[in-house]
Amino acid sequence: MAKPTHAPRLTHVQVIALGFAIMILAGTLLLMLPAASADGQSAPFREALFTAVSSSCVTGLVLRDTATAWSFFGQVIIIVLIQIGGLGFMTVATFAFLLAQKRMGLRSREIMLESINNSNMNGIVQFSGEIIAGTAIFEGTGALLLATVFVPRMGWKKGLWYSVFHAISAFCNAGFDLMGFQEPFSSFVSMADNVVVNVTFMLLIILGGLGFLVWHDIRVNGFHFKRYSLHTKLVLTVSAVLVFGSALLILIFERNATGAGLPFGQQVMNALFASVTARTAGFNTIDIPSMSNGSKLVTILLMVVGGSPGSTAGGVKTTSIAVIVLYMVGGFRGSRKPAVFGKSINPDLFRKSCIILFFNAGLALMATLILAGLQNFDLVDIMFETFSAVGTVGMTAGITRDLLPVSSYIIALLMFMGRVGSVSFAVALLEKKAKPPVTYPEETVTVG
């Protein structure tokens, strides 16, 4: 008698990828409703899909200006997708289990761990509650600070909505804004000199990009750096170097470009904002097409790095870059297993980091080659677009709304792969049952 066949069980990564795909599909259908568009007409499928992908994957690239093209209902759909996409749908689902006072199964807990890049299952349900609570506190505080600027200018109703929308968008590193009512696709260029807006945005972006594991470590150990885990130490160190080091480079490159004629203090704030937002947030207070090529290159490199594991940000991640740099330095010194902060780094982490870096870079460069063949854009602008998409950054040199349909689908795919995790995405499609290991004989290959 033949044994009954069972449908193949989805892996954890496949479940996460499928969850994002379902969320994107639902968002697309909702955005195609006439009520979602400002003009009362149903949005074309391509534009609705692109917007749903960009918001769910917390990127910020748009074919339509968010403020002028979408109604209040459409904007609510977008910000809900951003919130769920930023936290991860498994985090939201876990919180729903908490509210319903139901127990999560082992498999659900494992998927939750995968979705936030964690390896410790102890207290994972409580940890998800901590994530939700921390998010509410940070976003709520950010909204209150922004309200001090928006409410006096726009009135209570519009001012509060703008404050809440932008606080969520900034904390989730999404880059969606509603400032297009002044000039479509202008982002926050008109508020480049507003200290409250700039500082609030930078703090929200940084807090969202540090990662949930870092929050927990700081909450438990306070501000005692020596007590932190190696992960937290690397995240904080690399983040500080990237923010201030990149800001200095942008300040130098832009002094005779977008910074020409501005007070020095304004130039410093613009450079800091550009450095922070390039790590996957996507807002801008500098007109990006007018930036020097040096600043554009610095921005592309920041987009490659992105935020930190288990955060609302995308990119290769700060810890991956740290591990690669440490192994490179260790290689120059003849060390096979480098150490930092009194701890050694596992070689498996180096291999994984290299795979992630080259896979992400390979995706972006492949897409750059295809787009360069399809459309006559400046090569730097195309690279800016593709690295922005795969890093889920959302910054653009101004070519997004001029993309051909096939080009926009390519960018949408990059955003999806960048958010789910390019390597995880590949594993989700190709992963099969493990086969017995086979060891092949070694042979020397000349390299270098």
Image (tube, rainbow, N blue to C red):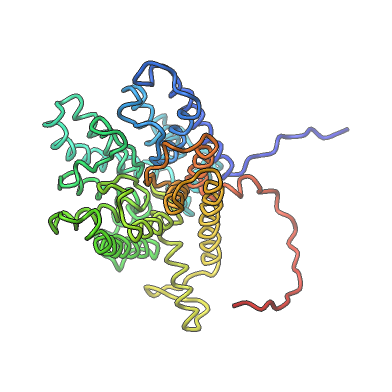
Judged left or right of residue 67, residue 156 is left
The image quarter in which residue 447 lies:
bottom right
Q: Tell me: residue 284, above or below residue 443.
A: above
Foreground residue, 365 or 27? 365
- Residue situated furthest right in the rendering: 1
Quick one: quadrant of the C terminus? bottom right
Q: x, y percentage for residue 332?
A: 48, 81
Q: Tell me: residue 386, above or below residue 73.
A: below
Quick one: quadrant of the N terminus? top right
**Residue 347 seen in this snapshot:** yes
> Residue placed at 54% from the left, 60% from the top?
358
> Residue placed at 39% from the left, 75% from the top?
342
> Residue placed at 20% from the left, 41% from the top?
190
Q: Tell me: residue 349, above or below residue 2.
A: below
Judged left or right of residue 106, residue 187 is left
Foreground residue, 93 or 334? 334
- Residue situated furthest bottom in the rendering: 334
Q: x, y percentage for residue 246?
A: 30, 62
Judged left or right of residue 98, residue 68 is left
**Residue 109 seen in this snapshot:** no
Q: x, y percentage for residue 45?
A: 50, 26
Judged left or right of residue 230, residue 149 is left
Q: x, y percentage for residue 392?
A: 43, 46
